[in-house]
Image: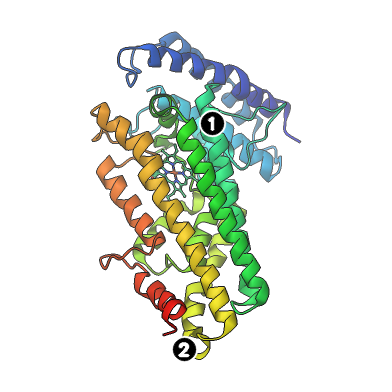
Amino acid sequence: MRTPLAQAFDTWIRDDFRDMNTRLEELYFSGEHPERVTGVGDDIKQQLVDEGREYIVQLLQEGNTDEGFDHGFDLLGNVGFYMAACRRHGITDPAVEHRSPLTEASALAMQLGASLGAIPRFASAHLETHNRAINGVYKSFTSLPDERIFLDYNTRGVFAYIRAAEALLHILPLGISHPVSLDLLRVAKVALEDVFDSNRELFQALDTERFFYCIRPYYKPHRVGLHEYRGANAGDFAGINVIDLLLGLCRADDPYYSQLLVDKFLFMRPEDQLVLRDCMRRKSLLASFLEELQPHGQTPWFRRNVAAFLEVCEMHGQVAQQHHQQLVEKFIVAPARDAGLENQQDLSASGPPLPVLLKGLRTLCDLRSAADRTDIPSRFPDIQRLRNMLENGT
Ligand code: HEM
């Protein structure tokens, strides 16, 4: 059971906090320079800081009530929403602080994060996969329709990726030659097509300016205690990496990719961390198909299953390209360019200037697409070997 105090804080986050953020967004957005927040709506900001702090001070006094993991994680999300909103409204700024001025919120977030085995700030699970709706409405920073659109489609995309990952995981005990592995590869492909379709709908439905000016800023990095933590992104769940690793398109021994995994672990729920850890030890499907190429490349099972495997890889690459060339381009790169903000530090969740962020995302996208690049450990030559066997029998 959640304590009455934690319940009251949750209600505040769902109602008054969301209304104050929405009012502030409307004020910023109606200004001549919608990126400017300083000096706008100061009375609302102060009310938001004070009311949130009051709940948090009482929650700290209440101490560890051992409410169980789910309630602890939910409370961490609520403190995290408060801290992220303070960052968004310019109440805190990691560039000019050595520690977060939100002392009590930091203390509660660190106590919860450390005891749960998660990052001491809100993670994407709080907004997506573990965001309970009450009477049809789940938690969000604002009540702007575009935030709903963004979160609805992020959640759909994440669950579709998870469906693909689960299908691939089921292949491990069966092996690549099992007839039912073919069914599972087909399930994985359909799930990735679902991500593609959902992303296409998001691309059309979301308003660029509203996203860029009123939603994205809640995902900026900020300090908790002494340290600065990057913001959450839709990729903070194990499934996407399970797909990368099991297909074999990305490898856990590639320092670029493993760095990404190391940095990401605590942004996931502990049960998700376990799935990913386990996956890092497994042999990929690509490696298994390559091993079978010589002895069994001509057999009907190999040809059938490798064809389905290559289709899954193809689809995974297409979704990665779509994310990079459509979503990132339309909703971040283009508006940043139009407003002359390309070199601003905190346009994205992780914070580096746009060119640096884009280079990293491009690498990831090219690994997932098995692109013909020799400067990264792309699996292009291995995928070609499988294709040749299928097309030419060699
Ligand atoms: C990461 C943009 C929607 C999946 C990122 C990053 C950006 C971005 C800029 C890098 C974050 C950082 O390091 O700072 C966007 C935009 C979206 C969007 C503008 C829509 C408006 C989605 C959706 C999915 C998704 C719907 C599907 C579930 C991912 C993944 C990552 C990521 C998996 C982690 C990096 C990776 O493994 O590729 N996104 N994203 N994104 N996003 Fe999105």
> Is residue 281 something that shows in the picture?
no
Q: According to the image, label 1 marks what residue? A: 149
Task: Identify the residue shown where x is 30% and y is 34%.
Answer: 334
> Is residue 339 something that shows in the picture?
yes
Q: Is residue 70 above or below residue 59?
A: below
Rendered-image quadrant of the C terminus: bottom left
Q: Amino acid at mark 2?
A: Gln
Left or right: 213, with 313 as reference point: left
Q: How is the image coloured?
A: rainbow
Q: According to the image, label 2 marks what residue? A: 294
Q: Is residue 153 above or below residue 386?
A: above
Q: Is residue 90 above or below residue 173?
A: above
- Crowd rating for badge 2 (residues with CA inside 10 Å; few <14, some 14–19, many 20+): few
Disc 2: residue Cβ within 8 A of ligand 1's nearest atom = no
Q: What separation in Å lies between label 2 and label 1 (alpha carbons)? A: 49 Å
The reply to whether dot 2 and dot 1 touch (C-beta < 8 Å) is no
Q: Amino acid at mark 1?
A: Ile
Q: Position of residue 167 (x, y in %)?
A: 62, 62
Towards the viewer: 106 or 215 = 215
Q: Position of residue 378 (x, y in %)?
A: 35, 67
Left or right: 393, with 180 as reference point: left
Determine the secondary structure under disc 1.
helix
| Residue depth check, mark 2 versus mark 1: number of the one nearer the observer | 2
Left or right: 156, with 241 as reference point: right
Q: Position of residue 43 (x, y in %)?
A: 45, 9
- Which label's residue is closer to the chain start, 2 or 1? 1
Rendered-image quadrant of the N terminus: top right
Q: Name, please, the residue furthest toward the top.
A: 43
Left or right: 154, with 251 as reference point: right
Residue 389: name its quadrant: bottom left
Task: Identify the residue shown where x is 40% and y is 36%.
Answer: 223
